[in-house]
Each structure stands twice: as C-alpha cells, then as structure tokens.
Amino acid sequence: MDGINFLLDDRGLRIHPSTILSVGTYAVVIRQNDVAVKMPIVHSFDGVMSIHKNRAKMQAEQLVYRQLMPDPTATLEGVVPCVRMWSYTIELQYMSQGTLGVMLQTRGISPIPLQRRWIRQLATGLRNIHARRVLHNDLALRNILLDGSLNAMITDFGVSSIVPLGLDMMLYRDRHGCSMWTDLVQLGSIIYHIVTGVPSRVTIYPRHDLYAVLPPRNIWPDVRSLWAGQIIEDCWNAGALGPAGAQAILNRLDHLT
C-alpha cells in the first residue's frame, strides 16, 4: 500500500472511507455511532506546516462554538448541537437525513407546511447565532442539516467571525466584508431555493477574492408571486428587516396565511 495518501484521524489511524460524511477545505467529518466527529484534515504524506494550519482553523471554529454555547450542557435552538470538544476535534449530533441541499435535489419542492417549518427553524437559528454576536458567513444548503424528523439546523462555523463587544451588530463588517446583512442575504437565497426548488443567482461572493458584497437589485429574480416572496426580498434588501434581523422573518411568518 506504499505511495497511497490516506486521511488520518486524531490518533494517526487511517480513516475508513465508509465513515466519512463530508470533506471540506481543512476538516473532515466522520460518523462514530450517533456522533459526527469533525477533525482537521491530515493526510499520511502531509508536512508539519499543513497539519498545523488545519489544526489552527479547527481551534478557531472551537472558539466560535464556545461563543455560541458557553454552557457545554446547553443547546442553541436552530443550531446542530455540539456534544463535546477536545484537542482539535468537535463532536456534533449526527443528523441522519443529511443536508437540505441533497433533500431538495432528490425530493424537489416540498409541501408548503414543511417549507414554513424549515424557514422558521433557520430564521430561529440565525436569530440565535446573531444574538451570541456571531456571523456565520457561509449559510448554504450544504451547511443546513436535517435530523430524523426533518428538522433543519445550521452547522459549520469554519469561516464564522465573532463580533467584538461594544460594536453595533447592525454596522459591523468583518475583514472579509461579512455582516449580519450578508448572512440574511444568504438566508434569503436558501429560502428562495426551498420555495422554488431552484437555486438563486443572488450571492454575496460574486468575485473570486471571496470578499463579501451586498447583491445589486438588478440580479434579484422576481419573487412577487411566491408565498414567501416578501420575506425573500427583505432578506436581500439590506436593512429592510431592521434591527430585529432574523426575528423579523419570524414575525412576518406569523402574519402570512
């Protein structure tokens, strides 16, 4: 088997491909019983610098989870529960139905009551994330997981940022241009996909430099005929939801028939 580059776990043992749930830029997630274990990517041929870089990114993500869940015994509604953290590893609740993206791809448009439930759960999750002064920065269908009852929860805080105390969440931009408004734009695009079954061209990353910008109105699709059209448009229109942010989405849902 010489010459084959394997993924290794935190003990230096080869990760069996059948246990891998996902592989990202710096981390791999594997299933161990009823837990999803996220750990830094380490290949059998990796050098020390590569290993340290991925471990540092995992430590940064651990800091975000501690910001979100300062009480390790508590959960945060709308966010995939963190079971425990140790060394460079994050253990999360295993979400048996996979990503929302795969669900939409395989099942198509879901009934409106399920659409409403997902939108409510995601808005609740983002509201709670922002309440803990965290910007997600990468809200996408691949980062929305479903449990056995098809409840949607937000995961993957690998590129998230923590808003320093004393700074206004409504005005804050991190070094990549991300803000509570860019999070809401991304949520609006997820809602559009849930409701229509097709992806939106509205993105906060139109350039290759991955610096976030608010999307110009001329790229918005027409959403006036959609039952959640006003919610989607308000997500894309920075500031339209006001200081309440994602909570305003919940308020709007309560008034939609």
Image: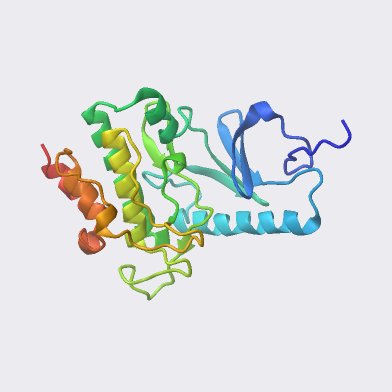
Which quarter of the figure is the C terminus placed in? top left
Q: In which quadrant of the rendered view does residue 195 lie?
A: top left
User: Which of these two is toward me, 73 or 173?
Assistant: 173
- Is residue 124 among what the camera can see? no
User: Where does the image place residue 246, in percent across and percent down from the top left?
Assistant: 27, 53
Q: Is residue 156 left or right of residue 135?
A: right
Q: Assign the N terminus to one quadrant of the image.
A: top right
Q: Residue at x 34, y 68 (%)?
A: 169
Q: Residue furthest front?
A: 218
**Which residue sits furthest bottom?**
166
Frontmost residue, 60 versus 221: 221
Residue 122 location in percent, x, y?
33, 44
Left/right of residue 205 with respect to residue 4 in the rendered view: left
Disc tally is: 0
Q: Quadrant of residue 135?
A: bottom left
Q: Is residue 159 left or right of residue 27?
A: left
Name the foreground residue: 107 vs 27. 107
* Residue at 45%, 52% in the rendered image: 138
Q: Position of residue 149 (x, y in %)?
A: 37, 26
Q: Which residue is depicted at the point 55% across and 55% down? A: 61
| Residue 70: image location, x then y, percent | 48, 56
Q: With respect to residue 107, does 181 lie above or below?
A: below
Q: Is residue 81 visible?
A: yes
Residue at the farthest top position: 107
Colour scheme shown: rainbow
